[in-house]
């Protein structure tokens, strides 16, 4: 029997298959969505992500996405998943975020949620995201373009969220961005691959037991790494940095969690090392 998998960095809006998005918006075809899910840069990815999120117009749409994800998780053997939701975008679009979130929770009651603010929007709109995170007992995250705004702008929102802070950092910018996230009390780091540029920082991640939520296919597809072979995941692991494997936006990167484990095996992780990665998802889970 294969052992259960878990993941800690998975965006609901990035999990929507072309078929499900076609059901959400019948004016788009599967081929249209597949074309949108082909991009060659991080900027191209963000455009595609925004395009998907703009199609999410009602609690019914979020429920459809969440129900489809629930099926995918079950068929992939993913027993535990924490789910990022782009609440910053819901508020920006003046949607009824509470109704959307209730729809997600009722479809996926077992998934702890992380509410993401949008880095490009700045710190003020993030405060309402952190307040909603408190209300729903969710984590508070920050996604989007990490190079666009310093974390200092988000200090009030981060303070509001208490210890439950799960930002994207060190994905496309640099090791200093990971350091900032640590200084602001990040419990885990979304991506964090640029930490490899600073071995002192890697030591700190190890000593403070702060894991990196690594998504290999995501990093290749967005160009955050030059190639699969250049991905630093094994070097980070060898430096003792806690690592968890994730899919990030599985529909947009045409991946799954079992596939990420296969890819890690292809990058040289032994069976024992893969077992450590598997266990890390449960070890660094928010809810356990
Ligand atoms: N939102 C969804 N996926 C993301 C990623 N990989 N980086 C930043 N923001 C995101
Ligand atoms: Zn992400």
Image: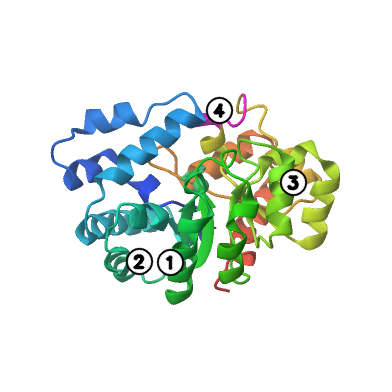
- Residue 224 in the magenta stretch? The answer is yes
Mark with earlier residue (2, 4)? 2
* Mark number displayed over residue 223: 4
- Residue furthest left as drawn: 26
Q: How much space separates mark 4 and mark 1, taking CA atoms?
A: 29 Å
Residue 265: where, in percent of width, then height?
A: 62, 39
**Residue toward you, 124 or 162:** 124
Q: Which residue is mark 1?
A: 111
Residue 163: where, in percent of width, then height?
A: 63, 70
Position of residue 267 in the picture relative to residue 79 (left or right): right
**Residue toward you, 72 or 204:** 204
Q: How much space separates mark 2 and mark 4, taking CA atoms?
A: 31 Å
Mark with earlier residue (4, 1)? 1
Could you classify mark 1 by the number of other residues whose Cα lies within 10 Å: few (under 14), some (14-19), or many (20 or more)?
some
Residue 4: where, in percent of width, then height?
A: 51, 61
Q: Which residue is mark 2?
A: 108
- For label 4, the SS is loop
As drawn, 216 above or below 39: below
Between marks 3 and 1 in the image, the one whose residue lies nearer the viewer: 1
Between marks 3 and 4 in the image, the one whose residue lies nearer the viewer: 4
Q: Are marks 3 and 1 in contact (CB under 8 Å)?
A: no
Mark with earlier residue (3, 4)? 4
Could you classify mark 4 by the number of other residues whose Cα lies within 10 Å: few (under 14), some (14-19), or many (20 or more)?
many
């Amino acid at each position: 029997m294969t052992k259960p998998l878990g993941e800690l960095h998975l965006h609901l809006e990035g999990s929507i298959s072309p078929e499900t998005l076609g059901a959400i918006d019948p004016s788009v075809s599967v081929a249209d969505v597949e074309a949108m899910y082909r991009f060659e840069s991080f900027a191209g990815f963000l455009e595609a992500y925004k395009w998907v999120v703009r199609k999410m117009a009602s609690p019914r749409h979020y429920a459809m996405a969440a129900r489809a994800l629930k099926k995918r998780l079950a068929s992939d053997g993913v027993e535990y998943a924490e789910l990022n939701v782009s609440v910053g975008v819901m508020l920006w679009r003046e949607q009824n975020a509470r109704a959307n979130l209730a729809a997600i929770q009722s479809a996926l009651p077992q998934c702890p949620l992380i509410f993401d603010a949008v880095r490009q929007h700045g710190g003020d709109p993030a405060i309402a995201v952190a307040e909603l995170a408190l209300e729903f007992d969710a984590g508070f995250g920050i996604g989007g373009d990490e190079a666009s705004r310093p974390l200092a702008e988000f200090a009030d929102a981060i303070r509001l969220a208490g210890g439950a802070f799960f930002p994207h950092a060190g994905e496309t910018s640099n090791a200093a961005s990971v350091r900032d996230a640590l200084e602001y009390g990040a419990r885990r780091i979304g991506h964090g691959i640029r930490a490899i540029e600073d071995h002192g920082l890697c030591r700190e991640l190890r000593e403070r037991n702060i894991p990196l939520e690594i998504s290999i296919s995501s990093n290749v597809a967005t160009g955050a790494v030059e190639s699969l072979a250049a991905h630093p995941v094994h070097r980070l692991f060898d430096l003792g940095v806690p690592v968890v494997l994730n899919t990030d936006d599985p529909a947009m990167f045409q991946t799954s969690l079992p596939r990420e484990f296969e890819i890690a095996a292809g990058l040289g992780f032994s069976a024992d090392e893969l077992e450590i990665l598997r266990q890390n998802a449960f070890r660094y889970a928010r809810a356990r």
